[in-house]
Image (spheres, rainbow, N blue to C red):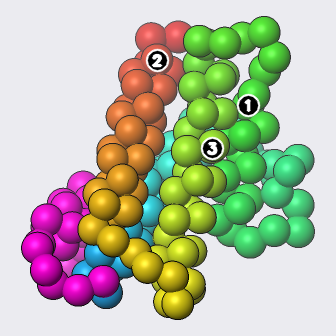
Amino acid sequence: MSIEISDLLKYARTLANKEDCGEVVYRTAASRAYYSAYHGALFFSESFLPKGEAKRGEGKGVHQRLISRFLDHQKPGNEGTTHNSIADIGRLLKNLKSVRSKADYNLESNFPQSESMEAIARSERILRLLDEAIKAKGTM
């Protein structure tokens, strides 16, 4: 059995919408939200971005290398273009990765339901931007 990217996000939403279930559930929801965005970005990267190592990602882990592939598309003066939308995905994914790291590794810090809901909203935004970029690539 395999799952879809949307299944991860749906599961994250299900967890985050549970009331008074404990912080571990909200942390898990944020982590699943990150991985839905990560896998969406990975698919896009492998399908549409130029092959090769990102300039900013040399010597980094696989997650940071993926983020760097998106960030490397920043083009000054091209605000509102596909290039900057792709770089925006990188920035959003980087931010979401830090939320996932807090959820998974900073067990001494509080992680309320609102943080998991925010992680889901960010993931949804990333997936929307990826979908828009795929459609834009198809019309080029």
Residue 58 position within the rendered picture, expressed as x and y whole percent measured from the top left: 88, 61
* Quarter of image, res 127: top left
Please state which amino acid type lies under the numbered disc 1: His
How far apart are the two marked residues, 2 and 3, measured between alpha carbons?
Answer: 17 Å
Report if residue 76 lies within the magenta region.
no
The nearer-to-camera label among 2 and 3 is 3
Q: Nearer the viewer, residue 77 or 26?
A: 26
Q: Say what secondary structure mark 2 lies in.
A: helix
Does the rendering let one see residue 58? yes
List the residue tagged with mark 2: 136
Residue 116 position within the rendered picture, expressed as x and y whole percent measured from the top left: 33, 64
Q: Are marks 1 and 3 in contact (CB under 8 Å)?
A: yes
How far apart are the two marked residues, 2 and 1, measured between alpha carbons?
Answer: 15 Å
List the residue tagged with mark 3: 90
Please state which amino acid type lies under the numbered disc 3: Gly
- Horizontal relation, residue 22 to residue 123: left or right: left
List the residue tagged with mark 1: 73
